[in-house]
Image: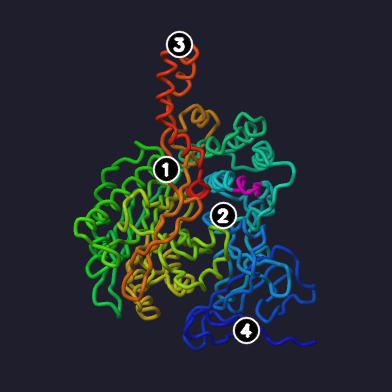
Amino acid sequence: MSHPEPRIQCSSPHCAVSNLLEARICERCGTPTIKRYLWSNQIAIAPEQQQTLVSGRYFAVSERIFLDTQPNQPPASSEEVPPEIVVYLQLFACYPHIPQAYGLLDATNAWLFDYGTVPIDASTGKLVTPQLIPQIKDLWIEATPLQQLNWLWQIAKLWNPLLSKNVASTLLNPDLIRINGQLVQLLQLQPDDEHQPSFRDLGDLWSRWAENAHPSIQDVIDQLAARLETGIIDQASQVIAVLDRAINLSRKAKQYSYHIYALSDSGPSRTNNEDAAYPVHPDEISGSENALAIVCDGVGGHDGGEIASEETIKYLRSKIAKLSSAEQYSSSEMLGKLAEYINGANDIISKRNDSEQRQERQRMGTTLVMALSYAQEMFLAHVGDSRIYWITPNSCHQMTVDDDLASREVRLGYALYRDSLQYPSAGALIQAIGMRDSAALHPNLQRYMIDDDCIFLLCTDGLSDFDRVEQQWRDHVLPVLEGKQDLANAVKDLITLANEKNGHDNVTIALVHCKVQPSTKVSDVSVSWSDVEFVLNESTLWSDTNMADSVLPDSTTVESASTKTEIPQPQIEQIGEPLLAKKQPKWRKPLILLLLVSTIVGLLAYYLLQGNTKDQDNRQLEGQDTEINQ
């Protein structure tokens, strides 16, 4: 039986011309084609169907790998999302570590999963590896010390979120743990059986990996695994603390530098520019180990949006400049500071709205994306629908989840993301800086380790709309990593691209180029267990996993063609928006002892503990979103 030659549609929504499967760009409009390779959670086709078009849409690369030839069309789905897929939706905030449920393979019970970009040959568009994404066990032996520690660190951060959804067994199956760029990605989730996974099981796996760990860190991984196996270490925060310390020591064999260029443009269809960026400078900004980039998209009323975006950047710059030495703070304390500053900026705009009696559509606000580097760490923050992308030689990952109605539906487990995008007002914002006081604001905070050269792209929706970043990163950003393009011209080209291909809004872009080179001062660093074990005895008051949930704000910001405004929405159930928990009181145990000694002191302790009930409640509401992102 003959099969028609498979073709792929142009990824531009204004074109959708059918091209040859291997085409790199559309033959009509010149837009780069998006090769969206998907994984099926089960074998759903016969062997003879490989290399043919399935259901008139998906090209079967193998029995479980499919290429979507109609990337602009909504995939098929079921009326009711089954429980085994709902868990992917509830872990949506963990994307891109957790794949995104994409849709049903028509006429089957197989579900397809999306990983953003996967390693492909740029000239042919074909997969680099037949496994879709390289397995960690295939890369482990040749990995650098920083890479090995970084991968374990990401796995440790995933433990609690996956354990809360009864899928932590995934992290014990090496076949499911993949490496895409600098990120750990899970191929699919494996439900826990009657034997609930424990850190002892994780220690058993890591002890096997320790045998082939880099000699300079082998002792750390071996001893850490042994303590996991014996139960001496039984908290994710302890594992993260040990790996944090080991990474901080290992990175001394590397030299980090960061280079930034940012630009803002009103676009061809707007008379004023409500966007703002930092740093806006005629030349590239270079720094040793510290760098700050901010992009804002102002919303609400004439002149209001630009005031909000400019004031937010001004306030954040002044506050962050005072963090002259990040070594004064732990990483989690830095996240606490950033949350505090973002809330402070929010309250300044909100109070100005109140003092000027701005109501509804006239209230001004702004979205925010921010990247702050220190040595090997990159701190990311965002509010609203401006985005941050992490670009490496083989991958481009969207690191932020939009604060909009579509994403909210996914996180509540109601709908797949591509289905929720079809809803009316799907892109309406659920929060923006300045629209309400900080009690209703929940900044999204993340922390990542940098182990090789990469670029962070911060942008407003003037560029990101219509998948322009996914289409164009290889042609317009990757050349910077390859040394073929300078940072300033790359940003200018992206601005031009956004105006020509989209052109419906202001556009603001910042590129942060992270360079990692061997240190000229230190040639080699060996880290032993004695160098890191002391962190187990230190306070974990600001542990990355010490975060709390909260409900979403009971309002929604709706964007129209000309402005965005806030309208009331009913209160919804908890879905894990991050809020920093307060520090654990150091005097709790002494008071309990005093209760046994004296009635007077006991009464005093009673009243003190009553005053801290709210603190206890917050600590118990440990948020899965922030756990994985911090």
> Counting residues from the N terminus, which is met first, the one under dot 1 or under dot 4?
4
Circle 3: is it few (<14), some (14-19), or many (20+) Cα within 10 Å? few
> Counting residues from the N terminus, which is met first, the one under dot 2 or under dot 4?
4
Q: Amino acid at mark 2?
A: Leu
Circle 4: is it few (<14), some (14-19), or many (20+) Cα within 10 Å? some
Horizontal side of 428 relative to 167 (left or right) equals left
Does the magenta-highlighted stretch encompass residue 164?
A: yes
Q: Quadrant of residue 359?
A: bottom left
Circle 1: is it few (<14), some (14-19), or many (20+) Cα within 10 Å? many
Q: Amino acid at mark 3?
A: Ser
Residue 381 at x, y percent in the picture? 39, 53
Q: Amino acid at mark 4?
A: Arg
> Counting residues from the N terminus, which is met first, the one under dot 3 or under dot 2?
2
Q: CA distance from mark 4 to mark 3?
A: 82 Å
In terms of secondary structure, where does tag 1 sit? strand
Residue tagged 3? 598
Residue at 37% from the left image edge and 62% from the top image edge:
511
- Colouring mode (rainbow / by chain / secondary structure / one colour): rainbow
Range shown magenta: 162-168
Residue tagged 4? 7
> Counting residues from the N terminus, which is met first, the one under dot 4 or under dot 3?
4
Residue 190 at x, y percent in the picture? 69, 53
Which label is found at residue 91? 2
Are the residues tagged 2 and 4 within 8 Å (C-beta)? no
Q: CA distance from mark 1 to mark 4?
A: 49 Å
Residue tagged 1? 580
